[in-house]
Amino acid sequence: MDLFKTYFEKNMTAIIDDKKILQELENASKDQAKVKEVLAKGRELKGLSLSEVAVLSNINDPDLVQELFETANHVKEEIYGNRLVIFAPLYISNLCSNECSYCAFRAGNQAINRRVLTQEEIAEETRILVESGHKRVLMVAGEAYPKQGFDYVLDSIDTIYSVQDEHGGSIRRINVNVAPLTVDEFKQLKDKKIGTYQIFQETYHREVYSKVHLRGKKADFDWRVTAIDRAMEAGIDDCGVGVLFGLAEWKYEILALMQHIYYLEDKFGVGPHTISVPRMEFATGSDISEHPPAEVSDEDFLKIVAILRIAVPYTGIIMSTREGPQLRGRTLDLGVSQISAGSRTNPGGYAVDHEDMSQFSLGDHRSLDEVIRDIAQKGYIPSFCTGCYRLGRTGEDFMDLAKPGLIKQHCGPNAASSFMEFLRDYASPETKKVGMEAMEKFISEMSLKDADTSRKMVDKVMHGKNDIYI
Ligand code: SAM
Ligand code: SF4
C-alpha cells in the first residue's frame, strides 16, 4: 500500500508542481513589450512555455486583450480555417456513487430522478440523433453502473454503433466521458473502437479538489490525474483533458493544465487530442453551482479560450451547450474547433426531455438544424467528418500530419463531403440554402488541388453515396 502511495506521489510531483505554478504567476512580467514578444511567438504556431502562458494570463489592458484575441484568431485561421466539428452528448445513465458537490448526479442528491437507459432506450436515443443528422456522439455516464458493471458501458457502445436510419446514416465515432478506468478496462474500451477518451480533472488545485469531491472513488485526486497515463498505456492515444471552471482560480488552472499537457507530451510523445473548457452551470440540488467559489466572468472565459488556442495550437478546443449562443459564437473566432449542438444532459432526454434528471442547465437550446444554419451564416463550415480515427490517424500520427500543416488537405474535403450528407438528408430547406452557399464559398477558397478533390467527393454524395472520406 505504501509502495502504491509512493508511486502516485512520485508521479504527482512529475505532473503538477504547485509551487512552480504560484511562482510563475507571481513573477510573470506585465511589461507590454514582453506581452507583445509572447504574442509574436504565438503567431509562429509552435506553442508556448509555462512562463509565457503566465504572462498572457496576466493581461488586463484592453488593447493587449484585443491583441491576444487577434493572435488567437490568427492561430485558429492558420490551423483550423473555418471548419467546426459537430457532436452531441449521449447520457446513458445518471446513477453515481460519488459526491461531487457541483453535480446534480451526486449520490446524495434526492432532488433528481435516477434513470439507467436499457439498450433499447439507448438505441432509441441514438436513432433520434442519427435522424437529426449527427455522426459523432460523446457517450456520458455517472460513476456507477447497473448489475452488468463495466460491461454496461461496453454494450452501450455496441448498441450506439449498430443503429442505422433510412438514409444509411449512423454514428461513426463515439467519444467517451466516463470515470477513470484501470489499464485493463481501458483496453476493453479501445477494443470497442472508441474515438477520444475524455476526462476532466475538474480542478488541478489539490486542496479545492478535496473540498468539492466529498465521497466515493472520485475523491482520489491521484487516481483521476493519472487516468490518461493508463488510457495511453492501454493504447488509447486520442485523449481529452479539461477543467471545470469556477472551482479554483482560472489562472492557476490553466497553468496546471499546461503542466499536465507537457507531462503527457514528454512521456508519450503526444499531448491531449482535445481540451474542454466547461464552466460551472446551475445544477439541481447543488448549492455550490449557484455560487461558484471562483466564478469566471465572460471576459476571462474568452481569455482562457484565446490563451489555450495560442499555447497548444494543434489541440482541439471543445465548447459545449453549457454556454449561450452569443458567447459560443465569440469563442469560435478565438479558436474553438468542436461544438456540441441540440444537446440534452439527461438520460433519455432526446426522446422525452425530463429536466428533473438533468446534470446541469443548458445555455443553448437550439436544434442541430438551427445551430448549423447559424454557424454557416457566420461563415463556418460544420464538419461531421470522422475520417482520421477510422484511418488510424490518431495520437502521434495525427500530430505528425497536423504540425507541418498536412492535415488540412484531408480535413477540408472531408468537411465538405460530410456536410453535404447533412444538407442532402437532414437539413430544413432554409438551412440547405444557407449551407449550399457556405459550401460553395468554402470550396472556392481552397487550393486548386483541394477544391478539385472536394468537388469530386461532394459530387459523389450528391449522387447518393455515403461516407466519402480521404
Ligand atoms: N461521471 C464521470 C466523471 O465525473 O468523470 C463522467 C461524466 S460527468 C457526467 C461529465 C462532466 O460534467 C464532469 O467531468 C464535470 O466537469 C461536468 N459537470 C458536472 N457538474 C457540472 C455543472 N454543474 N456545470 C457544468 N459542468 C458540470
Ligand atoms: Fe458523478 Fe461525474 Fe457527477 Fe461527479 S461529475 S457526481 S462523478 S456524474
Image (cartoon, rainbow, N blue to C red):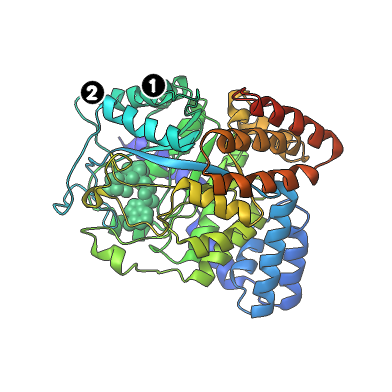
Disc 2 to disc 1, how far (Cα)? Answer: 15 Å
Q: How many numbered marks appear?
A: 2
Residue 279 location, x and y as percent?
42, 60
Q: Nearer the viewer, residue 43 or 264?
A: 43
* Quadrant (top left/top right/bottom left/bottom right) for the C terminus: top right
x 56%, y 49%: residue: 430
Counting residues from the start of the chain, the first of labels 2 and 1 encountered is 2
> Where is mark 2, residue-wise?
148
Mark 1 is on which residue type? Answer: Asp
x 22%, y 40%: residue: 95
> Where is mark 1, residue-wise?
158
Residue 205 location, x and y as percent?
41, 58
Asked whether residue 127 is in view, the answer is yes
Residue 110 location, x and y as percent?
13, 52
Asked whether residue 318 is in view, the answer is no
Q: Secondary structure at mark 1?
A: helix
x 37%, y 40%: residue: 223
Mark 2 is on which residue type? Answer: Gln
Mark 2, mark 1: which one is toward the viewer?
1
Q: Eyeballing the image, is 131 above or below 305?
A: above
Q: Eyeballing the image, is 252 above or below 86?
A: below
State yes or no: Cβ of the residue under disc 1 lies below 8 Å from any atom of ligand 1.
Answer: no
Residue 317 location, x and y as percent?
56, 50
* Quadrant (top left/top right/bottom left/bottom right) for the N terminus: top left
Q: How would you rate the neighbour count of disc 2 (Cα within 10 Å): few for under 14, some for 14-19, many for 20 or more?
A: few
Q: Nearer the viewer, residue 463 or 369?
A: 463
Q: Mark 2 near mark 1, Cβ–Cβ under 8 Å?
A: no
Q: Secondary structure at mark 2?
A: loop
Q: Outermost residue, left direction?
A: 110
State yes or no: Cβ of the residue under disc 2 lies below 8 Å from any atom of ligand 1.
Answer: no
